Amino acid sequence: MVKTLLLLILVVTSNQLYAKTLPQVIKQIKPSIVGVGTVQTTRRPPSKLMGTGFVVADGYHIITNHHVIPRNINVERNEQLVIFYRQNKQVKYRKVRVLAKDKKHDLALLRIEGRKFPAMKVETSRKAQEGETIAFTGFPIGAVLGLFPVTHRGIISSISPVVIPAPSSSTLSIEMIKRLRDPYFVYQLDATAYPGNSGSPMFDSHNGKVLGVINKVFIKESKESVLQKPSGITYAIPAKYIIQLLKNNKIKVN
């Protein structure tokens, strides 16, 4: 009994020692947060920010939402898929390519050209729980006010299916019917995200490990299609699908 109690005290003390404050975590993860969009020098403005992404694995790979990636890139007019980041107080961009897509879970895996970035760690040893304190960092209104990552904090208020049965068939789309056949669970948050937050990492506010990916469009279309006035509820796709996507492409997770 005494040994068990001592072991429990050591575990709790160890967790407290390694826990960080949210400001410390934000400082740690910010270099891994990037904007995802396109650049076309003949266009005005030449840069277009579509959403957020974050660096994982070996520092050469980025996770974002599938719906953030443009359906068509105008290669003939030199349009390029890029990531945006800040370096020495300047906004820069780097060309990327789509390595893999997971349309079902609205995820995309990108590969960076050039030097690697600091990578975020993905949680692999436990599942997030209802009531857990989380945070997410991204670009909620794009780069309108400059490319400065913004952090929101909240809790996981519910873990629920990605799609709910509609009261009538007239409110169902083909995509929704497909999701109803094989639904999966997502995190519902009490913090408000915006369209530019799509692809932002949702992370443990104590250690910065990724617990999920913010999704503001894809999931809302499924879960809130019956609402006349969509709510401000935010959703996140669980990290296990990030892990699955990385492993399917033979990329070491952390």
Image (spheres, rainbow, N blue to C red):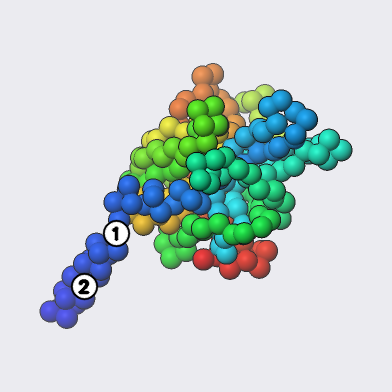
Residue found at x 47% / y 39%: 149
Residue found at x 50% / y 41%: 89
Q: Which badge, 1 or 2, is on the more N-terminal residue?
A: 2
Residue found at x 51% / y 58%: 118
Question: Mark 1 sits on what residue?
Answer: 19
Q: Nearest the camera: 4 or 29?
A: 29
As displayed, is residue 181 above or below residue 119? Answer: above
Q: Secondary structure at mark 1?
A: loop
Q: Are marks 1 and 2 in contact (CB under 8 Å)?
A: no
Q: Secondary structure at mark 2?
A: helix
In the picture, measured across the screen, residue 100 lies left or right of residue 115, that is right
Image quarter of the N terminus: bottom left
Q: Is residue 10 visible?
A: yes
Asked where in the image residue 154 lies, by quadrant, the reply is top left
* Percent coordinates x, y for residue 105 in the rendering: 61, 48
* Percent coordinates x, y for residue 48 in the rendering: 66, 32
Residue furthest to the right: 76
The 10 Å Cα crowd at callout 1, few under 14, some 14 to 19, many 20 or more, is some
* Percent coordinates x, y for residue 73 in the rendering: 78, 39
Give, as a three-letter code, the residue at label 2: Leu
Nearest-to-viewer mark from 1 and 2:
1
Residue found at x 36% / y 52%: 25
Tag count: 2
In the picture, measured across the screen, residue 239 lies left or right of residue 15, that is right
